[in-house]
Amino acid sequence: MLTHYLKIASRNLFRSRIFSSINIIGLAVGMGGCLVILQFAHFEMSYDRFHKNADRIYRVRHDRYLDGELQYQKAQAFIPTGQAMMDEFPEVTSYTTLFRISSEYDIVVSHTAKDGESIRFSEKDVYHVKGKFFELFSFQIIEGNRDIEALEPNTVMVSASTARRYFGEESPIGKTLSHSLAENYRIVGVFEDIPENAHMKFDFLFAWQEVTSPDSGGDDANWRWDGFYTYLLLAPEADAALLEGKFPAFIQKYNIGQVNKKASSVFVLQPLTSIHLHSDLLGEAGQNGDAKTVYTLLGVAVFVLIIAWINAINLSTARSLDRTKEIGVRKVIGSGKNEIIKQFLTESLVSNFLALVLACILVQLFYTYYAPYIGMSSSSYLMEAPFFWLAALLMLLMGSFVSGLYPAFVISSFKPVNAIKGNFSNAPTAPVFNIRNGLVVFQFVISIFLIAAALLVSKQLNFMKSGNLGLNLESALVVNTQVTSGDSLVSKNLSIFKEKMKGYAKVKGVTTSYDIPGKEYLTLMPNFRHSKNQEEFVSLHFTRIDPEFIPAFEIPLVAGRNFQEGLDGKFTMIMNVEGIKALGIDDPEEAIGYEVVWGNVNIGKAEIVGVVDFRSTSFKQHNYPVAFTSTVLPHKYVSISFNGNDIDEHIELVRSNWETVFPEVPFDYFFLDDLFNSHYQSERHFGRLLIIFTLLAIMVACSGLYAIAALTMLQKTKEVGVRKILGASLGSLMLLLSKKFFLFIILAGGLSLPIIHMLLREWLKNYPYQTALSWWIYLAPILAIFMISLLTIGHQVIRTSFINPSKLLRYE
């Protein structure tokens, strides 16, 4: 019997090739899009789950409060946190502490080969580690001691790709590496390159070295510097929430984070597996994902799939009217309703199977040619994983059932006499608000919302990218100096380099600084206050610039003056507008001459001589309140602004001069505008993906609309013939045959407006600086759907209108 059903299904598919192709392609697009997003979502949710003890590992988050007001939340804690917690709490069975030294300093790692050649690279992912790192994390060791839990002093482990960079195909075990702040560390192991679905990436794990002087009590007493990642392994039966309840007493016992009378600290445990999607803190180990984005894309994918199923239902129902005589004959010769339903469900299964095959091809093509354009990593390509095929199987079964059941019941309900006569005017398709028409309205609602969402994402992205930063980024090339101290020779060489660059006519300005706009400012001081009121503390970011910084970036001074060479030093300061507002000053002119102090033991004191207004961050976050000083090195960055846009020539000019002055320091550079644009990369990728799915949804919905229009034309064939004989014009026929669909669009537009308003305003709340939800974002999608529908329906109307009336009258 199944063979019989399959044979009839195949015949019907080939008989109605156009409708079958539209149906299968629509289903394939919906399935393929859904499978792509499911893979992406599955990959994003898989972060850090490959660790054996992933469900028992927690990161310690540090929240800083000042006078009861939250100042910041940080992914890092203090050096002694892990060891002290393991000593105090039986729930903590192990810990590890990591210091990403390459985020504090520009690190050059070097190795001296046998022939005396020095192999040197500027590195970004260098960590020092203490505690039993490999007891917590399940990173694979492929060479060296595979049972290692903790690193012995003066040893280091490297990733496989790093070992190849420094040593080629030779075994690195026993060889030594040094970096800017550590000499001759012996390599004891090689680990596999960190999987992409790990929130923390590193190439080097150096054994711990003390960062706190013995005079200050050493690392074990350093409860002041919260720049270290702390991970805890809890006992299997431990309750993280109950453990957190013990932290206030722990903080009080160790007097943690109390840098002044009004500062206080709170510790929070973050589950390892939630960090990637649910954590966006200061000092993150890398760029995390966003759960809202993942869930939004999942919703969009489901909507596109539902539209494809609705499209299949409408197409199947439309085609059913061509098969009424077949159904009538089968009923007369004894076929029951159940047999007919089984036949149409089989046809639905065949269509969905063919669509699934095509969807898998589309997924392959997508990952081959388009995925990098929207930021999807090849690591999220999971077609060989059981998850992918389980999702595909569920989609096949659900799609076959959902898209086949309603048409099967409609078709099987035809009365044999009417079916044989071809009289389907009384078929269950007449009421305006029947199921099929409701599905069409639902398609329109989804399509209108997706267009509005795509427009708003694009508008918000343009708003952030085109916002006034208060500084000139054009042709600004930045070099990492890899300086780690204020050595006088380094200072002299930097001055030489600056003077050499200033000698070129195409160079507009050269400046050095400790931080650079667009990068996270790492130094946050919680104890700034007015010299005459030292009880009112505020937190400010603190950084160093030279006197050329403000003119080089064309930063406007809103009050006061710039630093002057030889005149200013540690006793003068420039603040940005946010900085003086944090001090309670609204008028920049009032801030000039204002004296501030900071620190508890070694009190610093300075007079504000200028106020600037520019952004140190992107528009995705609030601007930092910053205090600038002109004290000397170390300066981590040299920035060169050029006249003209000959990028290759500018790079080569800087490179040649840099290698002349600093032959031992790798030339590591970036452009400042690229740095700022990189902050909006996730929005660009999200916007592009949303546009893709919006176009797919519209395409599938229009094919369904095409089917409904064809069905309407079929039902009104004789009426059109009569009206043409009576002199009806093309315009009147267009109005007659399409007004129902335009009523559907108006209804869908009315239903979509509150949805657009509510959901898109909620999405905008993710940004501190928001574009306006303009009126055209509500109206343009409705007009777009109206025009697309007019073209889709108009094609059917015009084709029917040009048929000879006599043929139309003979149709039935």
Image: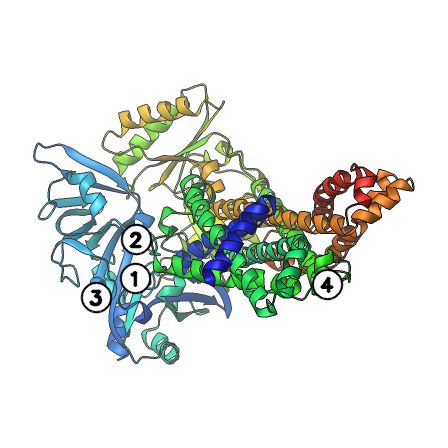
What whole-number distance in Å separates the C-alpha atoms at marks 1 and 2? 9 Å
Residue found at the very far front of the displayed protein: 333
Q: Distance between the residues labelled 3 and 4?
A: 77 Å
The first of marks 2 and 4 along the sequence is 2
Mark 3 or 1: in front is: 1
Q: Mark 1 points at which residue?
A: 50
Structural distance between the alpha carbons of marks 2 and 4: 67 Å
Q: Which residue is drawn at 48% across and 41% down?
A: 676
State the image coordinates of residue 496 (x, y, percent, origin top left).
32, 27
In contact (CB < 8 Å): disc 3 and disc 1: no
Q: How far apart are marks 3 and 2 (CA)?
A: 18 Å
Say which label, 3 or 4, has the lower sequence index: 3
Q: Nearer the viewer, mark 3 or mark 2?
A: 2
Which of labels 2 and 4 is toward the front?
4
* Residue at numbered disc 2: 195
Q: Which of marks 3 and 2 is nearer the N terminus?
A: 3
Above or below, 43 against 610 in this view is below
Three-letter amino acid code at disc 2? Pro
Which mark sits nearer the N-terminus, 3 or 1?
Answer: 1
Name the image quarter holding residue 488.
Answer: top left
Residue 135 circle label? 3
Asked whether the residues under the numbered discs 3 and 4 touch, taking CB atoms below 8 Å apart as contact, a structural biologist would say: no
Residue designated by label 4: 417
Q: Which of marks 4 and 1 is nearer the N terminus?
A: 1
The local secondary structure at tag 1 comes to loop
Which image quarter: residue 370?
A: top left
Q: What element carries label 3?
A: helix
Residue type for callout 4: Val
370 and 104: which is toward the camera: 370
Q: In which quarter of the image is residue 469?
A: top right
Query: For this view, does 696 lie left or right of residue 222?
Result: right
Q: Residue flagged by tag 1: what amino acid is it?
A: Phe
